[in-house]
Image: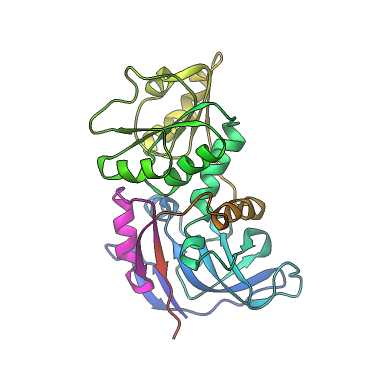
Amino acid sequence: MKAVVFDKKLPEHLANREVEKPVPNADEVLVKVVTVSINAADYRSMRMGSIPKRKIFGSDIAGRVEAVGKNIQKFKVGDEVFGDLSSYGFGGFAEYVTAPENLLALKPAGVSFTEAAAVPMAALTALQGLRNLGKIKPGQKVLIHGAGGGVGTFAVQLAKYFGTEVTAVCGPHNVDLIRSLGADYVIDYSKEDFSIGGPLYDLVLVVNGNNSLSTYRRVMAPKGKLVMLGGGLSQIFNIMLFGWLHSLGGKKMRLLAAKASGEDLEFIIQLVEEGKIKPIINKTFPLDKTAEAVQYISQGHARGKIVINVPHV
């Protein structure tokens, strides 16, 4: 089969290769990949030297079940599915990939493969940050810092779905997009400092940026929560090392480690099917242009998600 394989000798670290097609074991599903989206986890893992066993990245896949192991009960051949394989060795930048059934969910007929591939990691990260750690409640004031990317665009929509007042911070090119997704207030970080003169927030969701923890703490309500989903590596290391210090008293700061969940996928995709939230697709690329697509998203200016189309001859 065709696949995009990690090769550290190349400047872009990715090469188009012919590799052996995987064979599902008794507890796996073989998926014929139709689309796969790119996440920060892909290029950050490459930079940090955390390489999948088969050297094939790509976690968020959508496709059709090609074969099932003897212990599979949830799916059958021909089912249209999608899922996040980041906890199972990635493998999505290829024509076929194997996965356990608990990491997959059925794709509704009314949701395209492109939309489905854009959902898993980004939407689950936003959902688990807001709901699981943030304990989001209707009527709260929520700040989403870094609203323009894949996670951020889902976070804005989900925060509105949960009945909150949303202030979103993003770059100048994303202001209109984020406003169209329902944000009550949009702050262009190139023109305005979100930490000066504004309201205090019950929940601060940090998707991107590289601010000090004390900067975020200034905009938190007395019993406010901060949930960090991403951002600069120094910012992430700071909350890992010093977040507990900033959490003394009523304000709490936590770092999310999102987990793949078939149940959460089903919840999200139902919202997509009902039109209550929508994946924002920035660009699509063919499989043989995956290296170019990863380079584009790693520059940090994508509006929404980047999706790879996997052609089958």
Q: What segment carries the magenta color?
A: 281-306
Q: Position of residue 101 (x, y in %)?
A: 67, 64
Please report the residue visible at 63 percent of the width from the left and 55 percent of the height from the top: 266
Asked whether residue 262 appears in the rendered view, the answer is yes
Dividing the picture into quadrants, the one containing residue 13 is bottom left
Q: Position of residue 83 (x, y in %)?
A: 57, 60
Q: Position of residue 157 (x, y in %)?
A: 48, 43
Please report the residue visible at 59 percent of the width from the left and 47 percent of the height from the top: 259
Please report the residue visible at 50 percent of the width from the left and 18 percent of the height from the top: 245
303 vs 141, left or right, is left
> In the picture shown, does residue 232 fall above or below 105?
above
Q: Residue furthest left?
A: 191
Asked whether residue 55 appears in the rendered view, the answer is no
Colour convention of the picture: rainbow
203 vs 295, left or right, is right
Q: Position of residue 123 (x, y in %)?
A: 52, 49
> In the picture shown, does residue 175 fall above or below 5?
above
Dividing the picture into quadrants, the one containing residue 238 is top left
Q: Is residue 296 magenta?
A: yes
Please report the residue visible at 41 percent of the width from the left and 54 percent of the height from the top: 280
* 165 or 248: nearer the viewer: 165
Dividing the picture into quadrants, the one containing residue 281 is bottom left
> In the picture shown, does residue 95 fall above or below 200?
below
Q: Quadrant of the C terminus?
A: bottom left
Q: Is residue 115 magenta?
A: no
Q: Residue furthest bottom?
A: 313
219 vs 261, left or right, is left
* 115 or 212: nearer the viewer: 115
Count of numbered circles on the image: 0
